[in-house]
């Protein structure tokens, strides 16, 4: 089971699949946590889970939404991070704490981002918003390639 | 009227053409994620009045929905591709928040949901979005204004996000599980929106004479609606009293402090423009809106209203 928009990641690697409970032999309950509130991939993930689990012989497949705690990029597994990098997408750093008030940052977010193509640390932020809700756009000033970075949340 | 028919799932998935031969029709204007709160604990906390909780969730949901729609109107119209994508993502985040909040309102008190024609497959949150009149919307008026230039979008997203972030930061402690969870998620999202617009605010203010002129004009135009964000409606007071909501008056200092930081960095003085009065004291939270909201809704709702049983 992979993410529809990041197909190199399984739902487990992405940290979206939180729990799987077997209720008897033919009934399974799956908990998923949305990445972003408006993530359009959630419907596809849900459909894929129902399809795969029905195909695996479960008569009853229940997909539940788990909103608390909120998804964080810290849940992306080491395997997931390696898969992102191998696919040319820069994996996220540690997510900032969001406990108290979130301080205003007027300068571009400071991140140590290496180019997933040539591994150069000479990269610059193009935009905090990218091709999907979860990514920022970067470019490498060494090899000149643009690339996506999964932003910390 | 066709029923929602499921075929052997693997047929549809493994072969793109197989899907054309089967009827997997669903509600034409939604995402077919049957219930955005499936499995979420929607029990109403003890001592909380259900209609108050629903009305409060509608307010926050309508703010997000109307603002999302206005920001989404920038899609394909922004000054460059990066900002087009940024604004589209901001609209998408807000739409996601709106969906959960409207669904929460419907779960708390189903009497807020408009009655649809027999056989309509629209879920409650879509019924709330597409089948209410302007006077039933409870959004603040800042969200509904007709879009201006890019400076106007920058100022509007900034004012809205500074305020909403301050609210959501407090709402994380809501006794209602759904509101607390939506807030915890929303804080992360809106922090990106706020910082994006704050950086553009400083850039435009310190850019060319023309960019500064446009920014100041936008700030003067929107400033009269800033105080309304911190008015306490009786529903908000009751929701705060019972521990599920936040009194907006209580986040004013925090929001003003953040806004002052942006103004200082941009070397822009606080505008001296009086607040816009309500109509007989009534404002957006009371369902009193300007004409632009009606026109916006006419466009946003027309297709769903023409086809309330729409399937595809």
Image (cartoon, rainbow, N blue to C red):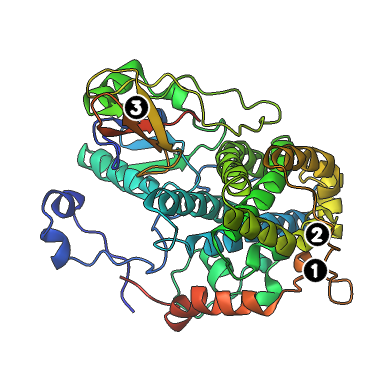
Q: Nearer the viewer, mark 1 or mark 3?
A: 1
Using the rendered image of the protein, determine whether residue A4 is visible from the camera's viewpoint. yes
Q: Where is residue B127 drawn, in percent x and y?
A: 54, 69
Chain to which the residue tagged by mark 3 belongs: A
> Which residue bears the numbered disc 2?
B228
Using the rendered image of the protein, determine whether residue B106 is visible from the camera's viewpoint. no
Q: Nearer the viewer, mark 2 or mark 3?
A: 2
**Is residue B17 left or right of A45 when viewed as pictured?**
left
Chain to which the residue tagged by mark 1 belongs: B
Q: Secondary structure at mark 1?
A: loop
Residue A142 occupies which quadrant of the picture? top left
Front position in the image: B46 or B13: B13
- Near mark 3 (Cα within 10 A), the count class, few <14, some 14-19 or many ≥20, is some
Q: Secondary structure at mark 3?
A: helix
Residues marked 1 and 2 touching at CB (< 8 Å): yes
Image quadrant in which the N terminus of chain B is located? bottom left
Front position in the image: B105 or B291: B291
Between the residue at mark 1 and the residue at mark 2, the CA separation in whole angstroms equals 8 Å
Task: Pick whichever of labels 1 and 2 is earlier in the sequence.
Answer: 2
């Amino acid at each position: 089971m992979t993410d529809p928009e990041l197909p190199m990641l399984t739902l487990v690697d992405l940290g979206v699949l939180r729990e799987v409970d077997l209720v008897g032999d033919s009934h399974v309950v799956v908990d998923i946590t949305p990445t972003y509130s408006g993530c359009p991939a959630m419907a596809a993930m849900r459909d894929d889970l129902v399809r795969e689990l029905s195909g695996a012989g479960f008569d009853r497949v229940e997909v539940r939404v788990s909103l608390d705690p909120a998804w964080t990029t810290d849940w992306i597994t080491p395997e997931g991070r390696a898969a992102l990098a191998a696919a040319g997408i820069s994996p996220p750093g540690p997510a900032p704490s969001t406990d108290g008030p979130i301080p205003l940052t007027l300068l571009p977010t400071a991140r140590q981002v290496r180019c997933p193509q040539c591994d150069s640390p000479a990269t610059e932020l193009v935009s905090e918003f990218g091709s999907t809700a979860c990514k920022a756009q970067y470019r490498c000033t060494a090899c000149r390639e643009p690339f996506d970075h999964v932003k910390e949340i | 009227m066709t029923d929602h028919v499921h075929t052997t799932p693997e047929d549809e998935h493994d072969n793109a053409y197989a899907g054309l031969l089967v009827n997997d029709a669903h509600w034409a204007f939604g995402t077919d994620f049957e219930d955005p709160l499936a499995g979420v604990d929607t029990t109403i906390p003890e001592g909380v009045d259900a209609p108050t909780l629903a009305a409060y969730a509608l307010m926050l949901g309508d703010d997000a929905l109307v603002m999302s729609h206005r920001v989404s109107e920038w899609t394909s119209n922004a000054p460059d591709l990066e900002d087009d994508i940024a604004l589209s993502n901001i609209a998408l985040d807000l739409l996601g928040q709106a969906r959960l909040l409207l669904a929460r309102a419907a779960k708390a008190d189903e009497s807020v949901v408009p009655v649809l024609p027999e056989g309509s497959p629209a879920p409650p949150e879509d019924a709330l979005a597409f089948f209410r009149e302007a006077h039933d919307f409870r959004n603040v008026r800042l969200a509904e204004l007709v879009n201006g230039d890019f400076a106007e979008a920058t100022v509007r997203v900034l004012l809205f996000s500074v305020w909403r972030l301050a609210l959501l930061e407090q709402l994380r402690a809501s006794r209602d599980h759904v509101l607390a969870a939506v807030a915890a998620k929303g804080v992360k999202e809106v922090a990106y929106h706020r910082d994006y617009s704050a950086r553009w605010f400083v850039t435009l203010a310190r850019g060319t004479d023309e960019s500064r002129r446009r920014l100041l004009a936008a700030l003067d135009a929107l400033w009269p609606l800033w105080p309304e964000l911190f008015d306490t409606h009786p529903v908000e007071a009751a929701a705060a009293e019972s521990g599920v909501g936040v009194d907006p008056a209580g986040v004013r200092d925090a929001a003003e402090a953040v806004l002052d930081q942006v103004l200082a960095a941009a070397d822009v003085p606080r505008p001296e423009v009086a607040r816009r009065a309500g109509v007989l004291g009534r404002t957006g939270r009371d369902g009193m809106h300007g004409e632009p909201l009606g026109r916006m809704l006419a466009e946003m709702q027309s297709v769903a209203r023409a086809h309330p049983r729409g399937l595809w």
